[in-house]
Image (cartoon, rainbow, N blue to C red):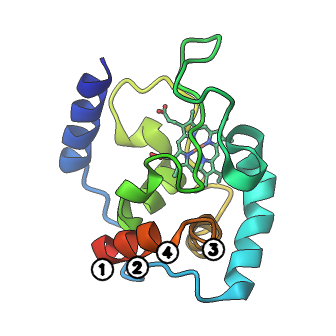
Amino acid sequence: MRLKLIITFLFTLFLTEISNAHNHFPITRDSEANILKGKVLYEQHCASCHMVNLTGAVDWKGVDKDGHRKAPPLNGTGHTWHHNDELLHKIIKLGFAKLMNNYEGKMVGFGDKIDDAGIDNILSYIKSYWTDDIYEYQISMSK
Ligand code: HEC
């Protein structure tokens, strides 16, 4: 089930031509100001599901009462850092709904509420939680 979803996801990504390219990756955590801006946006738009401190929903590997997957942790204990910046930016901007066929889960896009710079600041904030080794790894795959 999960494998099928992942395959559908990758296949859809492959087919989906999203023309608004961003060439500002990798996104670092070098700017304290950007991290703070990202924190404000995160708390406003994301914390309700991904929780403060980015810990994700309780028992995030299970499903919620609607049968949907729960919000995973973004703090480096989940698999967020396996995705490069281009994909993470798309997930936040477009949501899984626009990236996968027949997606019925809860991760919608925020492109109508948060601009690209804001999304990048949220990513800086998310990365500020990661250990050095996963941060470096994810930066190297985002280049
Ligand atoms: C209504 C609940 C909800 C809100 C609000 C929400 N998310 Fe999510 N998010 C989810 C769920 C659920 C998933 C898992 C998607 C799935 O498998 O269906 C997810 C997945 C993700 C992923 C992929 C993580 C991974 O490890 O693969 C990222 C990145 C993400 N969200 C970032 C954000 C950001 C940034 C915000 C705020 C701008 C946000 N989300 C707001 C529910 C939410």
Q: Quadrant of the C terminus?
A: bottom left
Task: Please say if the residues under marks 4 and 3 sit with CB atoms less than 8 Å apart.
Answer: no
Q: Amino acid at mark 4?
A: Asp
Percent x, y of residue 128: 62, 72
Q: Earlier in the sequence, mark 2 or mark 1?
A: 2
Percent x, y of residue 22: 39, 75
User: At x 36% / y 55%, what residue is drawn?
Assistant: 82
User: At x 42% / y 83%, what residue is drawn?
Assistant: 24
- Whether residue 21 is visible, yes or no, is no
The label on residue 66 is: none
Task: State left or right for residue 51 relative to residue 19.
Answer: right
- Label 1: which residue? 143
Task: State left or right for residue 55 relative to residue 9.
Answer: right
How far apart marks 2 and 3 lie (CA) works out to: 12 Å
- Whether residue 51 is visible, yes or no, is yes
Q: Amino acid at mark 1?
A: Lys
Q: Earlier in the sequence, mark 2 or mark 3?
A: 2
How far apart marks 2 and 1 lie (CA) works out to: 5 Å
- Label 2: which residue? 26
How far apart marks 1 and 4 lie (CA) works out to: 17 Å
Depicted 33 relative to depicted 116: above or below: below
Residue sitting nearer the eye, 131 or 143: 131
Depicted 102 relative to depicted 140: above or below: above
Task: Please say if the residues under marks 2 and 3 sit with CB atoms less than 8 Å apart.
Answer: no
Q: Secondary structure at mark 3?
A: helix
Residue sitting nearer the eye, 30 or 10: 30
- Label 3: which residue? 121
Q: Earlier in the sequence, mark 1 or mark 3?
A: 3
How far apart marks 1 and 3 lie (CA) works out to: 17 Å
Q: Amino acid at mark 2?
A: Pro
Task: Please say if the residues under marks 1 and 4 sit with CB atoms less than 8 Å apart.
Answer: no
- Say which of marks 4 and 2 sits in front: 4
